[in-house]
Image (tube, rainbow, N blue to C red):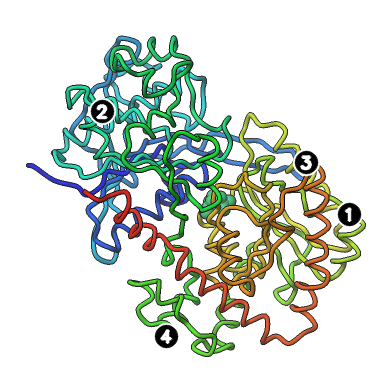
Amino acid sequence: MKKSLKVAYFSMEIGIKSEMPTYAGGLGMLAGDMMRSCADMAVHAACITMCWQHGYMKQTIHPDGSQIYEDRQWNPADYMEKIQQTVTVTLEGREVTVGAWKYELKGLQGTVPVYFLDTNLEENSPADREITKYLYGGDGTMRLKQEVVLGIGGVRMLRALGYKEVGTFHMNEGHAAFLTLELLRERDFKDDAVRPNCAFTTHTPVKAGHDVFAYDLAWKVVGDMLPWHIKKLAGEDALSMTLLAIRLSRYTHGVSKIHGEVSRLMFPDEKIDSITNGIHHLTWASPEMQTVLDTYANGWRQDPTILSHLHCADLPDDAIWQAHQAAKQRLIEEVNKHTLLQFDVNHLTIASARRVVPYKRPELLYQNLERLKEVACGRLQIIHAGNAHPSDTFSQSVIQRMVQRSNSLKDCVKIVYLENYNPDLARLLVSGADIWLNTPTRLYEASGTSGMKACINGVMNLSTLDGWWIEGYGMDPESGWRIGSLARAADIDAHRAIDAEDLYTQLQYEVIPEYYYKNRDRWIRRMKRAIRLVGFFNTNRCVQEYLQKAWVL
Ligand SMILES: *Cc1c(COP(=O)(O)O)cnc(C)c1O
């Protein structure tokens, strides 16, 4: 059977649901939301990804803050249908068999199949069965093998499944760039025959975050799938997956306006546009908020741009407040299962949850404990969550310090650190908190999407101006608060001190008084303005932009 696709979306990870650990963070969550919007909009898309046995690990936090990270067992057969077809790829000169599982994402108007490639098959040697074991685990050799399976194996699997005509092969990050090697082989090694069918999203604003391999190693693993002119495409000194992807794509973009600028500085000779990320509005709105929007923003499910056109008077204050209090109640009940400090539904609640990595500065709020006490005593409760990478002892010590601080500050500020940040916990946090706190070092956050998830629930962002929030705050400064300015500080430590001081100032003179002492109307008006932002920051709009700029065939 001959089948056609508008787009085949290749991504090393995808977040479908908490029980399937096939993702690590924002990149995978974006892939999931993009595919959900494609299904809602009846775009003929398929996703190619990997069937990770262990995408993220089970996190256990001990009372002293130390953590253990363990493999989480799951059985793909509980969630997916095994595909009969298999294909092979050549790794280090030997044939490795690649199978696949199919998950169907059902949307409002269509279904998007997600194919999870798997080398954990009896035909393969024990070592090759482990290629799809750990997402981002292992050394350069392992990473090359994984990228061959995703890129080359992925194209071959699509062909085996009968997809002969594909408008655009989309690379979600450079991990997928080897798909171009199989397309080159199909098309007489003519770059011009490949480029019109490829598009690329770059996600990483720091050079060190881009995959680069020594050519010696690449020859050893990938062998003669590397074309004779690979150095012309992927760089003379080493094989850059980003350059390979850019040079064989007709369209490349970053994931926010600022990230587009940063990417152009990083790759000054290349043409790089930007399409700002979004979220799938229906996935992230709480049930209560969905009911409110069904009543007062009719049509928002199919067409979230309706949210942009809402007037504050369209949404009754009571309805918004009650929907939020219901979500907050649910969050507080969950929190109180995990701490002896009983959290209170009538206290201002800040949530801050994300992968723990240094650039996100998870400890910014604790830069000056005296100042925090002065500002927040008796007025604030704080919820943290986030996994550190099992081999990242620095970030693990950050979590440990945060847990210890929650003990030392407990008579003044209630602080809890919840285990195992995943989409279910994210949904609870982004709908139940009053404030979503985000403190990345400027220019290091490509976009960020968790703050958009907060917005659809009427939860305000308090964030440094980076990634998407430069645009969100710029569209409507009344929809939340900024920390620090757009100006660049002299160095990272000076910048941290300035941002921390401004964070305390915002809390002391803006956020806390507005919540407790001023007119509640003003607060609720901000909630509505936060919701309105999702009229733009949603993945339906992203899909439309991709269709116009990236998926034109
Ligand atoms: C949305 C989400 C992310 C990405 O959020 P950031 O804004 O990049 O921090 C990561 N993990 C989970 C579980 C999410 O739901």
Kindly indicate whether the residue at mark 4 contacts the one at mark 1 (C-beta within 8 angstroms).
no
Q: Is residue 324 left or right of residue 172?
A: right
Give the residue type at disc 3: Asp
Q: Is residue 388 visible?
A: yes
Kindly indicate whether the residue at mark 4 contacts the one at mark 3 (C-beta within 8 angstroms).
no
Separation of disc 3 and disc 4 at Cα? 50 Å
Separation of disc 3 and disc 1 at Cα? 22 Å
Q: Nearer the viewer, mark 3 or mark 4?
A: 3
Residue at the farthest front position: 269
The quarter of the displayed image where residue 475 is located: bottom right
Disc 1: which residue: 369
Is the residue 224 above or below the residue 202 in the image?
above
Q: Nearer the viewer, mark 3 or mark 1?
A: 3
Is the residue 134 above or below the residue 407 in the image?
above
How far across and how far down the image is residue 453, in percent?
Answer: 53, 63
Separation of disc 2 and disc 3 at Cα? 43 Å
Nearer the N terminus, badge 2 or badge 4?
2
Specify few, some or many for label 3: CA neighbours under 10 Å numbering under 14, 14-19, or 20 or more: few
Q: Is residue 64 left or right of residue 383?
A: right
Disc 4: which residue: 295
Question: What is the secondary structure assignment of the residue under circle 3?
Answer: loop
Nearer the N terminus, badge 1 or badge 2?
2
Separation of disc 1 and disc 4 at Cα? 45 Å
Nearer the N terminus, badge 3 or badge 4?
4
Give the residue type at disc 4: Thr
